[in-house]
Structure formats: structure tokens, C-alpha cells
Image (cartoon, rainbow, N blue to C red):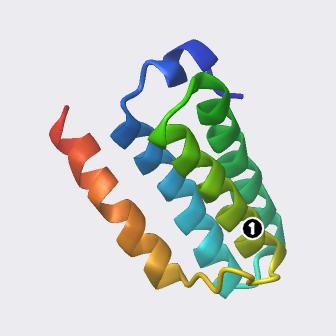
Amino acid sequence: MVDKIKWNNFSLAEKMANIGSEILRMAASKERNDEPNIQKSAERALELIDLSITGEQRGRSLEEFLRLRDIVADYYIGQQIFQTSKRELSSYFLPFAFVARNNF
């Protein structure tokens, strides 16, 4: 369980870097057909996204989190409506990790 107050004090880059870490962990688990870890990582990523959605009042960040939730759910369930690859996910989240790391 995530500390909601601490999470809401994270910058957008820190939130996205943490979410990205879970999503990429889920993608790596999918490649290994490691169902228990796929589920754990997906649930954790969706939990972090949901916390971010409830913490946002309005604006582009909220829209981004809502779209991200759809993409993650689609990737996890396997319908591939968005046809998202692990490489695309990595390319999307990597800049957030760099920004979050450089802010420390």
C-alpha cells in the first residue's frame, strides 16, 4: 500500500518514473510468461495511476493519467487495442526517470 500523502507530494516526473518502473517490470514478466509477477506489477502500476488520478484536479496531467490507465489495462489484459510494445513503453517512461533522478 502506498502512502497517499507522500505520493501526492511527488513531482509529475517522480510519479511517472515510478509508474514506468512497474509497467516495465510487468512487460519483462510478460516476456517470461511469469503470470504471478505480471499480475503484481500490473496491480501496482494501476494503483499508482489511480492515486495519481484522484490527486489531480484537472488539466493535462489528469488527461495523461487517464490515457495511461487505458493503455496499461489494455497491455495487461492482452487485447492490444493500442498495439503498445515494451519498446514504446520504455521510450515513453525513460525521460521521466532521467528528470526524476536529476532532481535529487
Residue at the farthest top position:
5
Name the image quarter holding the N terminus: top right
The one of 61 and 25 positioned closer to us in this rendering = 61
In this picture, residue 23 sits left or right of residue 54:
left
Label 1: how many residues lie within 10 Å, few (<14), some (14-19) or many (20+)?
A: many
Q: Is residue 32 above or below residue 69?
A: below
Query: Picture quarter containing residue 4?
Result: top right
Residue bearing the label numbered 1? 38
Q: Position of residue 54 (x, y in %)?
A: 67, 27
Residue at the farthest front position:
59
The one of 59 and 38 positioned closer to us in this rendering = 59
Q: Position of residue 40 (x, y in %)?
A: 76, 55
Report the residue at 60% width, 57% height from top.
68
> Across the whole image, how many numbered discs are drawn on residues?
1
Name the image quarter holding the C terminus: top left
Report the residue at 59% width, 76% height from top.
28
Residue at the farthest left position:
102
In this picture, residue 7 sits left or right of residue 31:
left
Q: Position of residue 77 (x, y in %)?
A: 83, 73
Report the residue at 42% width, 72% height from top.
90
Q: Is residue 13 above or below residue 11?
A: below
At mark 1, the secondary structure is: helix
The one of 39 and 79 positioned closer to us in this rendering = 79
Report the residue at 69% width, 47% height from top.
44
- Amino acid carrying label 1: it is Ile
Q: Position of residue 12 (x, y in %)?
A: 39, 37
Q: Is residue 92 above or below residue 100?
A: below
